[in-house]
Image (spheres, grey):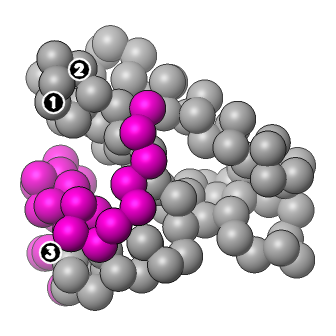
Amino acid sequence: MEEITDQLNMYQLLTVFDSVFSPSLSEDSIDLKQYAEKLINDAVTYVAKEDNEVAGFITFYASDEKLEHSFITLLAVLPKYQGRKTAQALINQCVQTTITMGKKEIKLE
């Protein structure tokens, strides 16, 4: 797993995966550049790679110290990598990070 920590890589990730979502993020009138900035500032994102290519990613919010939970906002796997437990590995990484941050549960947004 690799954490995405800069806005350009986040924007590129959102652009590559835009069509995986239904409706796509851009169809939903989301400005991907602004959304990338928001995610870098407020969320944690991990990517899973296979064959040196990004296969999937998970983004979750866990920075609010008042909350005892984190919540998953995005989870996507490219179609050619689906069925290989990529999403399970991404969720496991989210769980480990959530535990490390002292949170007690994970919710879906």
As helix, strand or loop, the secondary structure at mark 1 comes to strand
- Please tell me how crowded label 1 is: few (under 14), some (14-19), or many (20+) other residues with Cα within 10 Å: few
Which quadrant of the figure has residue 108? bottom right
Q: How many marks?
A: 3
Q: Are marks 1 and 2 in contact (CB under 8 Å)?
A: yes
Foreground: disc 2 or disc 3: 2
- CA gap between label 1 and label 2 equals 5 Å
Q: Tell me where residue 89 appears, x and y as whole percent.
A: 49, 24
Where, quadrant-wise, is the C terminus in this rendering?
bottom right
Label ID, residue 50: 2
As helix, strand or loop, the secondary structure at mark 3 comes to loop
Residue identified by numbered label 3: 26
Which residue is at 50% across, 24% downward?
A: 88
Residue identified by numbered label 1: 53
Label ID, residue 31: none
Relative to 71, 74 lies left or right: left
- Please tell me how crowded label 2 is: few (under 14), some (14-19), or many (20+) other residues with Cα within 10 Å: few
Label 2 sits on what residue type? Glu
Which residue is at 75% across, 75% downward?
A: 64
Label 3 sits on what residue type? Ser
